Amino acid sequence: MKKSTISIDKHFIVGDIDKRIYGSFIEHLGRAVYEGIYQPGSPFADEQGMRKDVIKLIRKLNVPIVRYPGGNFTSGYHWEDGVGPKNERPEKLDLAWSVIETNQFGLNEFMDWSKKANTSTMMAVNLGTRGVEDAKNIVEYCNVKGGSYYSELRKKHGYEQPHDIKLWCLGNEMDGPWQMGHKKASEYGRLAAESGRIMKMVDPSIELVACGSSFLDMDTFGTWEDTVLSECYDEADYLSLHQYYGNRDNNTAEFLANTVAMDRFISSVISICDAVKAKKRKSKSIQLSFDEWNVWYHSNEQDQKLERWCKVPHQLEDIYNFEDALLVGGMMITMLRHADRVKVACLAQLVNVIAPIMTSDTGAWMQTIFYPFALISNYGRGTVLNTIVETPVYESKHGGAPYLDSVCVMNEENETLTIFAVNKDLVDSMEITCDLRQFKDYRMKEHIVLTHSDLKAVNTEEHPENVAPIIIENERIEGGIMQMVLCEKSFHVIRLGK
Ligand code: AHR
């Protein structure tokens, strides 16, 4: 059995967790909107066509913010097509995903849906095929009370009160050659600065996310961030990061070691943000918005076979297995360890499209990745502590990968201490020793484990709990020292409190 120690000191603090780190994402893509959150005529739909069974599951995930309407879709989108009388809305080509967009669901429906799902909105503007003017107009439509063309148009559409959207993305993945209206870093940086300046003239209370790199291995990574921020440092509040992983070589140890790469990605982006801050002699720090992250690869081959210009195809419908759930848990732990700078993050995506929730005509069900997300989102509220973790490492292409990924969250108000951990060892269990002497009278409230004998085990509509958490008891707390065993290949939530 391997051994690890976690040293916890309540005075060593990384930072308070911004709840928006538990955000997610709905794009007009595949069956995310249509047949996902919206399906008029379904026995599960409410009077507006919103799927109540899906909303119920989203509420379990406790998602405080959802990014919309894309993704790549944003870069060709005309938001005006999706507002006003439904019978007057045009059907259009969506060049991002080679499908027909019917526009029967748009901005106002999304805002109604958000209220029902108990979430707020992170809205993306099109800086691909459009620009400053459109960015100005959509903020006016959403956030101005009245007395101007677009705010009055919103009222005419039945929305008397402004939507008051606080967080906006300045385009999507503008570094990517696949993106409609793809730009050089300097071109995008200027456009982001001017769009952002004018959006903030309309509503100074909004916050803006500038596009960082689409993933760490982009050739332009680094210089992109530096150049973009050099242009729009004053207007931007956040810089985005996107990253998806896949186990294409069927090497689980390497797959799980991607948390090392993710950690390095975050640290590198922080360094670049701070280098630009220093060069510009600014006091403001740019925060990080990891607004697309997940596992994405299972559906790639299938998606190559899709016919162009159909409506609502099954697209990006990854069926997740147990090892994916382990990595999702590890990715969340990695972001939490940077809670001082990662303020927003969006699991991409939420329903049907690379998603924790799937729908069919007979119901909605939970994929394996649903569980680590729900557990961390629900129990990971408070302050991240800077723990010292001593654990064995294994060699991976990203360098030494710790067998134990963990983070510790203290919530002084609720008098709780929660440890999230992944034992990446595929064969050996791990004995954990943890000094709790500063947390007098704390006892074990619950030890939740997600594990399975088969790394490739999946959930299905018929068996949505094939891979699901269980509660165990195997800890010993004596003289403030806690000892417990984490079985091989497992995700843990260790909840302590008074
Ligand atoms: O989430 C799927 C796609 O991945 C998004 O549209 C895009 O931004 C990213 O490349």
Image: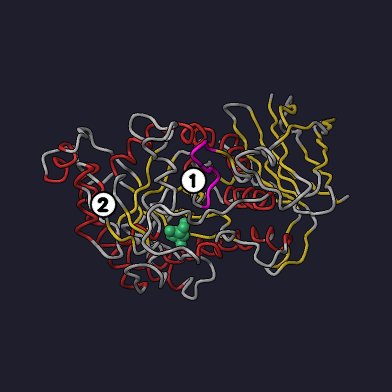
Tell me, for residue 350, which label it has, or none.
Answer: 1
What span is in magenta?
Answer: 354-364
Label 2 SS: helix
Q: Residues within 10 Å of mark 1 (few under 14, many from 20)?
A: many
Residue pictured at 34% horizontal, 53% vertical? 124
Q: Write down the quadrant of residue 444 in the picture.
A: top right
Residue 192 figure quarter:
bottom left
Q: Quadrant of ligand 1?
A: bottom left
| Residue located 44% across and 49% down the image | 31
Q: Is residue 328 above or below residue 307?
A: above
Confirm if mark 1 falls within 8 A of ligand 1. Answer: no
Q: In the drawing, does residue 91 fall left or right of residue 5?
A: left
Whether the magenta-drawn stretch holds residue 359 is answered as yes
Tell me which label, 1 or 2, sits earlier in the chain.
2
Q: Can the viewer see residue 137?
A: yes
| Amino acid beneath label 2 | Trp
The location of residue 149, given as percent across then percent down, is 11, 45
Q: Is residue 230 above or below residue 327?
A: below
Q: Amino acid at mark 1?
A: Leu
Q: As drawn, is 368 to the left or to the right of 343?
A: right
Task: Please provide percent x and percent y for residue 173.
Answer: 41, 63
Q: Position of residue 276 (x, y in %)?
A: 42, 66
Neighbor class of circle 2 (other Cα within 10 Å; few <14, some 14-19, many 20+) is: some
Q: Is residue 193 magenta?
A: no
Q: Is mark 2 within 8 Å of ligand 1?
A: no
Which residue is at a point 22% across and 60% down the rendered structure image?
Answer: 132
In the rendered image, is residue 240 in sight? no
Asked if the residues shown at circle 1 and circle 2 are in contact, with their CB atoms under 8 angstroms apart, the answer is no
Q: Secondary structure at mark 1?
A: loop
Residue lying at the far right in this picture: please name it: 1
Residue linked to disc 2: 79
Is 135 displayed left or right of 112 in the figure? left
